[in-house]
Image (spheres, grey):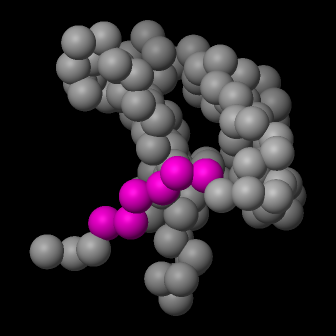
Amino acid sequence: MRDGAHACLLKSEEDNGKPVPPRFEYFHDGRLLSACNLHLDTSWRYQEVNGEPATAARLQEMFTAAGLPAPERDQKEVHRTALGIVYKFFGLSLPRDPIVSGTLPTVLLEPA
């Protein structure tokens, strides 16, 4: 992921059997700019945004302004709110038709 490439990674382990929150990571030119669990709670030791300090701090400010973390709120609502902030902050978008009625390109990595 060099030569100016941008890469976003959204990890979801719903089939893990454990309450693992979805994790978002954003890389640019091989550097991690930000990473966080989208529940923004203390589970799995990820309570705040990590990564490049200026980028992580700005993203954390947006989460805080939206009232996150919010342990009293429904986890799905928190997830949607956090994901919306991530999309807005990094200018991400996904095409509606393939999401609703098609298939998005994915990569499944098996343990070595």
Left or right of 26 on screen, residue 89: right
Picture quadrant of residue 112: bottom left
Q: Residue 70 location in percent, x, y?
A: 77, 50
- Queried whether the magenta region covers residue 69, the answer comes back as no
Rendered position, 48 above or below 52 = below
Q: Residue at x 47, y 15 (%)?
A: 55
Q: Main secondary structure of the magenta part?
A: loop
Rendered position, 39 above or below 84 = below
Rendered position, 31 above or below 84 = above
Q: Quadrant of the N terminus?
A: top left
Q: Write the start and end of the magenta stretch as one range.
A: 104-109
Inspect this view and state whether residue 95 appears: yes
- Queried whether the magenta region covers residue 107, the answer comes back as yes
Front-most of residues 110 and 42: 110
Q: How many marks?
A: 0
Q: Residue at x 31, y 66 (%)?
A: 109
Q: Residue at x 47, y 23 (%)?
A: 56
Picture quadrant of residue 75: bottom right
Q: Residue 37 location in percent, x, y?
A: 53, 50
Q: Residue at x 64, y 31 (%)?
A: 86
Q: Residue 95 location in percent, x, y?
A: 75, 36
